[in-house]
Image (cartoon, helix red, strand yellow):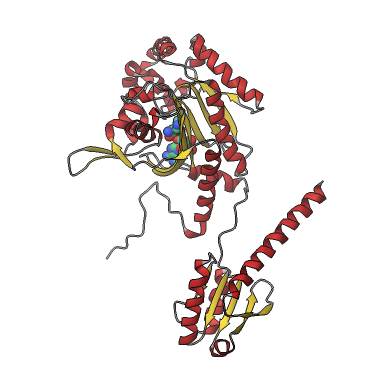
Amino acid sequence: MDMITQAPRGTLDVLPEDSHKWQYIESTALSIAQDFGFREIRTPVFEHTNLFQRSVGETTDVVQKEMYTFEDKGGRSITLRPEGTAGAARAALEHGLLNSALPVKVSYVTSCYRYEKSQKGRYREFHQFGVECFGAAAPQADAETISLALLILKSLGLENVKLHINSIGCPTCRARYHEALRAYFEAHKDELCGTCLGRLERNPMRILDCKSPVCHELAAKAPVMIDYLCDNCAAHFEAVKGCLDAAEMPYELDTHIVRGLDYYTRTVFELVAPNGLVVAGGGRYDGLLQELGGVAQPGLGFAMGLERLLMVMEENGCHFPPAPKCELYFVSMGTKAVQQCFAMATKLREGGVAVECDIVGRSLKAQMKYADKLGARYTVVVGDNELETGVAQLKDMTTGESEEIRLDDSLYTTLYRKSLDRELAGMTNLFGSVAEIG
Ligand code: HAM
């Protein structure tokens, strides 16, 4: 029989040895976003296909080439979400979130699906942390959103990620720009790829982020939107930059950012890592909610790719909290001891202590070896003798030292006091080194 031991191309397994890094990144991002007023939203992994056609846009690469779309058994066209904004906007409208005090701020951690050529930092299943803010039109909302993305990266230890910003205007100023773009690409019509030939009439801006090399080269010399902004859009962009300047947030104007999704208006931005990977992207989408049949309210947000973020953090030697370890391992000898250890472990676990005991039926030596492999901080050997006296040896596995402990409720207090002592020692070290620097 064939062994099925290979995951589909473009997917990634997160193994137990790495999962704490994911938890760390996700909880850091969610909690910082919470400080900015964002509350988590969870939406389905699949939606009606037309949600993405309407929001992401018919002429985008995502919709034209990359969606995982299928017919369900009821004959409906269903698509695995290629991104998080559309679902969040749909849910906000469906549940009337915009009928309450505005702005409404939501955050999410989601898996996304795009059938892309897999390469470094590009997967077919990937994960995003993202936020969406509905009902805020003022330029300081753009700056706040950008500053949230930057603060998350900074808190994770990434300060060398560059902020690139641009404005891609509104439908009013874009009409004039589309004309200029059409005229430019019309002159190079023979060189465009088949997909872009179709885009020329319907949505020439989409040619600008085509991945085919020839279109890409042509796009580099095409007119840029920033030169066509209407007065309102130009003023909005100036005000966004004004806020960034005031907060001393450095940015680079990158007139070639167009973003790969159709819903954007005005401010767009990307955060670029030292290795060139875009770890986060976002911007304003003032027409999206209305386009979905909802209220005419503005919106904006961003999403960061978690696989890319983790990769960049590792490349930059960012600090991760240590993997959680076993605090106490009960080494048991004999049936009675097994039962007693199980009972003690149960109690300690109720108190939140990370305890393990033998569930394989190993010898004393093998149990000690396993406890060592686990990296258990302490071990206690419990046999007939210990059961009789109610006293055992608590062995510190890092120092090798042992001390007498009682096998009763005081064990919890003993362990708790030890963890407090360690925490205190850690703080003393920290303040000690701060004092040295100072
Ligand atoms: P996006 O630029 O398509 O925007 O994706 C956001 C981020 O997701 C990218 O910067 C990248 O880090 C990551 N990403 C995208 N595709 C892949 C892939 N195939 N493999 C790995 N990582 C990937 C959006 O999705 C918008 N919904 C962001 C947004 C929210 N705009 C406003 N609100």
Residue 48 left/right relative to 313? left
Residue 311 vs residue 193, the one in the foreground: 311
Query: Where 122 falls versus 242 (above or below)?
Result: below
Relative image position of residue 158 (x, y in whole percent) = 61, 41
Question: Based on the displayed image, in which of its 4 quarters is residue 174 positioned?
Answer: top left
Q: Residue furthest left?
A: 74
Residue at x 57% of width, y 82% of height: 381
Query: Where 102 falls versus 433 (above or below)?
Result: above
Residue 188 visible from this viewpoint = yes
- Assign ligand 1 to one image quadrant: top left
Question: Based on the displayed image, in which of its 4 quarters is residue 204 positioned?
Answer: top left
Residue 173 vs residue 314, the one in the foreground: 173
Relative image position of residue 57 (x, y in whole percent) = 34, 26
Query: Where 306 falls versus 358 (above or below)?
Result: above
Query: Where 127 falls versus 380 (above or below)?
Result: above
Relative image position of residue 425 (x, y in whole percent) = 72, 61
Relative image position of residue 22 (x, y in whole percent) = 50, 50
Quarter of the image that includes the N terminus: bottom left
Residue at x 47% of width, y 77% of height: 342
Residue 31 left/right relative to 249? left
Circle count? 0
Residue at x 48% of width, y 77% of height: 343
Residue 306 left/right relative to 187? right
Residue 224 visible from this viewpoint = no
Residue 112 vs residue 187, the one in the foreground: 112
